[in-house]
Image (cartoon, rainbow, N blue to C red):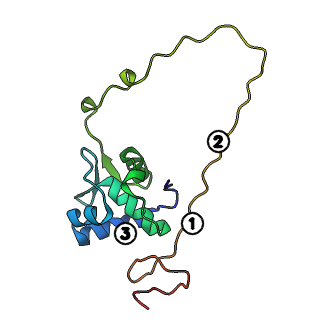
Amino acid sequence: MATFSAVTRQHILQAIGEQDSRGRDDFLGVYGFTPDDGYALLHEGRVYDPRAVVGVAHRYATGRLAIADEVAVDAAAAVLRKRGFDVTEPAVATRAPVAAARPARAPRSTTRTSTPRTTTRASSAAPERVAPICPTCSMTLPATGVCDYCG
């Protein structure tokens, strides 16, 4: 499962630049993404698919592509917003009401139990290692530190 803590604004800009150079259809096809209906990343007057951009930005950050199944559109939008980008969402009227999706809960009991509650803290995922990137071609560098393409 991909975490996006290593993805920076620069990685996102690299992914946007790649989509600009490849074109939207080729960019989505190469990385196995489909268009994000209703969601759009807006940058410098152009529109991009949030999931694909975040998935490819993850590749620039870690050396591993976050495949389409690992990138939820809501999570991608949150990552992009946190890095300072504008993301539009579909109109609220088109989504199912949240209250209708939740099952009814039983009322709380008013009696107290004698056992004390214990709280456990969920461990946070460690950030993924940021892979070094060739400054010339923006490919991830191998362990030798010398780009296979640029030499």
Query: Could you say where residue 104 lies in the image, as x and y percent from the top left?
Result: 45, 16
Query: Could you say where residue 78 lies in the image, as x and y percent from the top left?
Result: 42, 47
Instruction: Say which of marks 3 and 1 sits in front.
Output: 1
The kind of secondary structure element at disc 3 is helix
Task: Report crowding for label 3: few under 14, some 14 to 19, many 20 or more residues within 10 A (C-alpha).
Answer: some
Confirm or deny contact between disc 1 and disc 2 (CB under 8 A).
no
How much space separates mark 3 and mark 1, taking CA atoms? 18 Å
Which residue does the image show at 73% across and 24% down from the upper left?
117
87 vs 5, left or right, is left
Which residue does the image show at 50% across and 16% down from the upper left?
105
Q: Is residue 75 above or below residue 18?
A: above
Quick one: label 1 or label 2, which is nearer the N terminus?
2
Q: Residue beneath label 1, please? A: 129
Which residue does the image show at 39% across and 22% down from the upper left?
99
The kind of secondary structure element at disc 2 is loop
Q: Is residue 130 above or below residue 89?
A: below
Q: Say which quarter of the image contains residue 134.
A: bottom left
Query: Could you say where residue 146 lies in the image, as x and y percent from the top left?
Result: 50, 87
Which residue does the image show at 23% across and 66% down from the upper left?
26
Quick one: label 3 or label 1, which is nearer the N terminus?
3
Q: Residue beneath label 3, please? A: 14
Instruction: Say which of marks 3 and 2 sits in front.
Output: 2
Query: Could you say where residue 11 lies in the image, as x and y percent from the top left?
Result: 42, 66
Mark number, residue 122? 2
Query: In terms of depth relative to the viewer, which is nearer, 51 or 85?
Result: 51
Q: Say which quarter of the image contains residue 126.
A: bottom right
Quick one: label 3 or label 2, which is nearer the N terminus?
3
Confirm or deny contact between disc 3 and disc 1 (CB under 8 A).
no
Among all residues in the image, which is located at the extreme bottom? 151
The kind of secondary structure element at disc 1 is loop
Q: Amino acid at mark 2?
A: Ala
